[in-house]
Amino acid sequence: MTPARKALRPMTAAAVSVAVLAGAAFGLAPSVQAAAPAPTTATATTATTATAAFAESTASSVSIRFVDIPGDGGVKLAANVVAPADADASRRLPLVVLPTSWSLPQVEYLAQAKKLAEAGYVVLTYNTRGFWQSGGKIETAGPPDIADASKVIDWALANTPADPGHIGMAGVSYGAGISLLAAGADPRIKAVVAMSGWADLVASIYGNRTQHSQAAGLLAGAGALTGRPSEEFQQILDDFFSSNLAKEKDLIAWGKKRSATTYLDRINANGAAIMLGNSWGDSIFPPNSYADFFDKLTGPKRLELRPGDHATAELTGLLGLPNTTWSHARQWLDRYLKGERNGIDTQAPVQLMSRTARGDDYEGYPSWSAVPSGQRRIPLAGTEKITANHDSGANAGTVLLSGALDQFLKVPPLASIPLLPRSHAAVWQTGASAREQRVRGTVKLHTTVTSDRSDGTAVAYLYDVGPLGVGKLITNAPVTFHDRTPGTPFGVDLELFSTAYDVPAGHRLALVVDTVDPLYIEHNPDGAHLTFSSPAADPSYLTVPVRD
């Protein structure tokens, strides 16, 4: 049994548990019987009851209708129309369409839909196909999902006072991905707010040929609990978790079809104003692909990156509480759907918040490429040889939980650097810095690797190390190789996950590389060894982006 196979069963069980706990946070966790592929009647009733309870508490200035909309191929989409109570055909209102997040029912957006309706919007929220009361099967933002978005817009224009010239889409996570993809398929969409989503699905869950197993397991478990996975999606999951390299090209092609980067030219041609938001510690959709995608957009655009994990920055807004992320989202829609001069378009288009910042202090930059003002190059001298298949104690934490702890308590994953076993972890440290180091952007590792096996995985971590040797995780990333000639050195260039982190004066930076992390599936055969060297003709180094 390969290491990937050994990791599958416990990982999936843990992911399903996390999915249930995440649903419970919204008061939506289904009963145990809901483990069947289709949601139970009790599960559907939970969503309907929660939606009805919200409707009863809504002020009379807003009306809510529960409707079924025919999606692509006639599939029923369960939806809500939220609009000003006095809206009628005598005046047209801007339309905002909100596709639900993965596994969450229509109640997800109602608090924000109410705020938008009170501000003069027609808002249509709908359950994406394959989930809850909607028909069809889970297509994972595939062509049917994108066609559904256009069908929903068609229905809204025919059945509500929506203005065909002022249409926007917004969403969190799955809803963000669908909204961004729809902007490339439907030129009627004039504004998009995509929060905690992805631009490149392959890079998000299979970056550097490494399966992000906890992230994918969470999606798989939650999808099985609350929806009906399609045969294609189930096959992709089977190939993904079994490390079926014979199907790797199919997996990549499947992911690219569901990535906004694939349709960049169409998105730019359609010209929608696009706001992207993500968290530095997003353990499902790391921020790198959003950042790279942002600089290639040619229309009005905004990028917000802040502390947190997947969708944690938006959570309080979904619960109806004050929330900066949702406030900015509404300002963006007001500017580009209602024409309000509220100043959001005059701010620097890139807004970053350091993970060590207190409060809502954003830093503004003209572009993503302009974020670091310099690059600190740290040589990685010497040769380090480690034995694979052992967790050194350095790791990137737990999906959903670790980034949230970093956001709310300023406690990222920790490791005692002096106590890391050097037989299982390669370690390089800088001297103590006399001044604060403001890391901003994407850390890059260049090194030479030699393995005594043809396949393997390494995970790199960058730590902020205090006087007592305790390291706080700044960033990390895995890399996997296949079909290498044993004993033959090869170069590795690895981009770690983008971040913003202030390293205090007197602290050191430490680079740690090991071979096992609970977030990822590793591919090191038993007894394998990895050697990291720095040849004179091609020295190894770490590039750290810094801001003066």
Image (cartoon, helix red, strand yellow):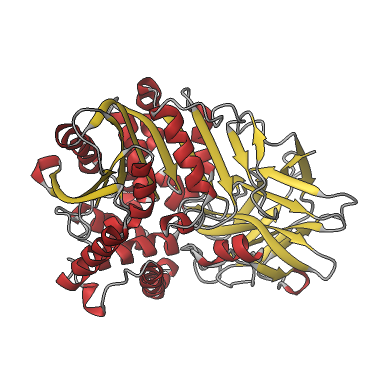
Locate the C terminus by quadrant: top right
Task: Say which residue appears at 75% left-offset and 74% top-offset.
Answer: 419
Task: Judge by depth and name the residue closer to the eye, 32 or 372.
Answer: 32
Residue 46 lies, with reference to residue 364, above or below; the image says below
Residue 144 lies, with reference to residue 190, above or below; the image says below
Residue 525 lies, with reference to residue 349, above or below; the image says below
Task: Judge by depth and name the residue closer to the eye, 100 or 430.
Answer: 100
Residue 240 placement (x, y as % from top left): 35, 57
Task: Judge by depth and name the residue closer to the eye, 292 or 243.
Answer: 292
Quadrant of the image occupied by residue 377: top right
**544 left or right, relative to 225:** right
How many numbered circles are shown? 0
Residue 344 placement (x, y as % from top left): 55, 32
Task: Say which residue appears at 27% left-offset and 73% top-offset.
Answer: 30
Residue 65 placement (x, y as % from top left): 19, 50
Locate the N terminus by quadrant: bottom left
Residue 47 lies, with reference to residue 535, above or below; the image says below
| Residue projecting furthest to the left | 74
| Residue projecting furthest to the top | 269
| Residue projecting furthest to the right | 434
Residue 509 placement (x, y as % from top left): 77, 56
**470 left or right, relative to 154:** right
Is residue 177 among what the camera can see? no
Is residue 7 among what the camera can see? yes
Quadrant of the image occupied by residue 258: top left
Task: Judge by depth and name the residue closer to the eye, 463 or 246.
Answer: 463
